[in-house]
Image: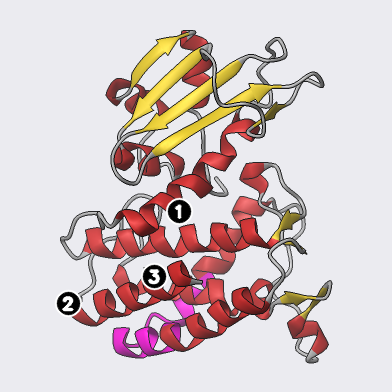
């Protein structure tokens, strides 16, 4: 909750200071101006998923509101998300940045209260890139924080600023993103006990170790000590951009320091922590 409040305060100040002229957003939101990124973020608050999930029931359903957008025939999840995002961008193309900012601050407070009042261990929406469906509420909440944080960086970059260096939020974002590592390695066969480690440098960094299990999967729950079969060292800027595909795995490898099994290191650098 402290992170959510800090994120909202930082985002509100950033948006109010931004110039009104539209600028192009970075790669994750191709074709969007600054207002389009805001409209897409507003969609994330208002669509049916943020009508809440308490006591196993959607709050919106309990209050009699209709469900959010449905999948079209033959539509996969990434296509669905891009489509409904674009609908919101188009719908708000004539809304002023000031009005969008006011609305985001209002709805953001409601989302933060939902997190506060929810049981962190309760089942919630799945986090596909972590291989968790359903996911515990704490992971779903952390995933949503990373989306807000990433959009905020897009807005900063579009307005000529660099990435926010505050490690208090970035450390949480990276810890959430790196929970995709076991799912990233899911198709990699390795003897039980094999370890793949990613170390992110800097004040917001840390170390994440995925261990091969007896059933052929990978887990972050195993011991983090010992000598890994592959070690990848990344700076924080490269790490978060890689996880949202702001840079490609091959580019990340050129910036990384690697030790051990090259194929395992390359597999680790295929990590992605968004619906992609």
> Exactly how many numbered labels are in the figure?
3
Disc on the earlier residue, 3 or 1: 3
Disc on the earlier residue, 2 or 3: 3
Screen quadrant of the C terminus: top right
Depth check, mark 2 against mark 1: the one in front is 1
Residue 84 higher or lower than 164, as above or below: below
Q: Position of residue 123 (x, y in %)?
A: 78, 61
Magenta segment, principal secondary structure?
Answer: helix
Q: Which mark is residue 113?
A: none
Per the rendered image, the range of residues in magenta is 87-104
Residue 174 higher or lower than 71, as above or below: above
Q: Which mark is residue 7?
A: 3
Residue 92: say if magenta: yes
Element at label 3: helix
Give the CA distance from mark 2 to mark 3.
20 Å
Give the CA distance from mark 2 to mark 1.
29 Å
Q: Where is residue 96 in the image (x, y as percent from the top left)?
A: 32, 87
Q: Which residue is drawn at 44% across and 65% down?
A: 148
**Residue at label 1?**
172
**Residue at label 2?**
19
Q: Which image quadrant is residue 59 in?
A: bottom right
Disc on the earlier residue, 2 or 1: 2
Q: Quick check: marks 2 and 1 in contact, CB under 8 Å?
A: no
Q: Residue at x 57, y 33 (%)?
A: 181
Q: Quick check: marks 3 and 1 in contact, CB under 8 Å?
A: no
Q: Position of residue 222 (x, y in %)?
A: 66, 28
Q: Which residue is drawn at 25% across and 74% down?
A: 14
Is residue 89 something one can see in this rendering?
no
């Amino acid at each position: 909750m402290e992170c959510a409040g800090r994120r909202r305060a930082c985002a509100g100040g950033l948006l109010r200071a931004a110039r009104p002229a539209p600028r192009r957003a970075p790669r994750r939101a191709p074709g969007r101006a600054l207002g389009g990124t805001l409209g897409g973020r507003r969609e994330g608050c208002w669509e049916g998923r943020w009508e809440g999930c308490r006591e196993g029931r959607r709050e919106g359903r309990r209050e009699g509101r209709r469900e959010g957008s449905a999948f079209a025939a033959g539509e996969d999840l990434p296509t669905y998300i891009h489509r409904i995002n674009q609908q919101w961008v188009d719908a708000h193309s004539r809304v002023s940045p000031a009005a969008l900012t006011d609305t985001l601050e209002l709805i953001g407070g409601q989302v933060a209260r939902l997190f506060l009042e929810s049981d962190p261990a309760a089942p919630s929406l799945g986090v596909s890139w972590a291989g968790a469906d359903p996911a515990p509420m704490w992971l779903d909440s952390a995933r949503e924080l990373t989306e807000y944080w990433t959009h905020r960086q897009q807005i900063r970059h579009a307005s000529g600023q660099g990435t926010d260096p505050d490690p208090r939020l970035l450390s949480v974002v990276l810890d959430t993103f790196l929970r995709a590592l076991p799912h990233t390695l899911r198709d990699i066969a390795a003897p039980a006990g094999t370890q793949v480690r990613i170390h992110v440098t800097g004040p917001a960094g840390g170390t994440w170790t995925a261990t091969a299990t007896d059933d052929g999967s990978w887990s972050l729950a195993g011991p983090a000590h010992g000598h890994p079969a592959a070690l990848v060292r990344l700076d924080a800027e490269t790490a978060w951009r890689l996880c949202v595909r702001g840079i490609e795995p091959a580019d990340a490898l050129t910036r990384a320091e690697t030790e051990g099994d090259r194929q395992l290191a390359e597999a680790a650098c295929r990590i992605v922590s968004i619906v992609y």
